[in-house]
Image: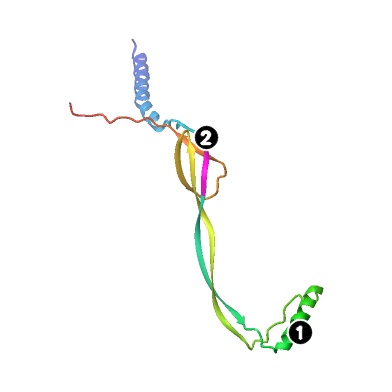
Amino acid sequence: MNRIALQVSILVLTGAVAALWTKPAAAQQHTVIQAENVRFDYAQVLRVTPVYQTLRATTVEQQCDPEPTGKADSRLSRVVGAVREALGRERDPKPSTGENCRPVPVEREFRRPIAYDVDYVYKGSRFRSRLPEDPGNKLKVRVAVTPVIAPTSTSR
């Protein structure tokens, strides 16, 4: 073999060896992600129970006592009031003069649903979950299957 052919052979061989050494590094850059064993199905909803948040608020309102009237005037005013109401002429009650009014604290309670406890059955098994919305009659569920791998023992 002549000297030039020998040098070319060494260069080709060196390139092949270098390519073999760099292949595993390139293979390490690509991670293989296995697809998850997941599917979606529907479960039958058995019961939905709302979970409430209770809020309390106190406001100050004017409370007015009725103005005193005489007995005879009272009967007459009731008859006139009933006739006016029947005819539809007096829709708004007379405003109070404010002499018999006082501020009174009034506490109110408000309840609002913040979540729902849902009992449902899937393939004969019963489950319960707290959900942000009422699902209705059917509930979409995520079914995932993963094999159980027993730990290997290192002692013999």
Q: As drawn, which residue projects farthest toward the top? A: 1
**Over which residues does the magenta segment extend?**
43-48
Dot 1 and dot 2 residues touching (CB under 8 Å)? no
Q: Which residue is mark 1?
A: 76
Residue sitting nearer the eye, 145 or 154: 145
Q: Is residue 8 above or below residue 78?
A: above
Q: As drawn, which residue projects farthest toward the left? A: 156
Is residue 17 part of the magenta span, yes or no? Answer: no
Residue 78 lies in quadrant = bottom right
Quadrant for the C terminus, please. top left
Residue sitting nearer the eye, 14 or 26: 26
Secondary structure, mark 1, is: helix
Mark 2 neighbour density, 10 Å: few (under 14) some (14–19) many (20 or more): few
Q: Which amino acid, by three-letter code, is at mark 1? A: Leu
Residue sitting nearer the eye, 121 or 77: 77
Describe residue 91's horizontal placement relative to residue 56 as left or right: right
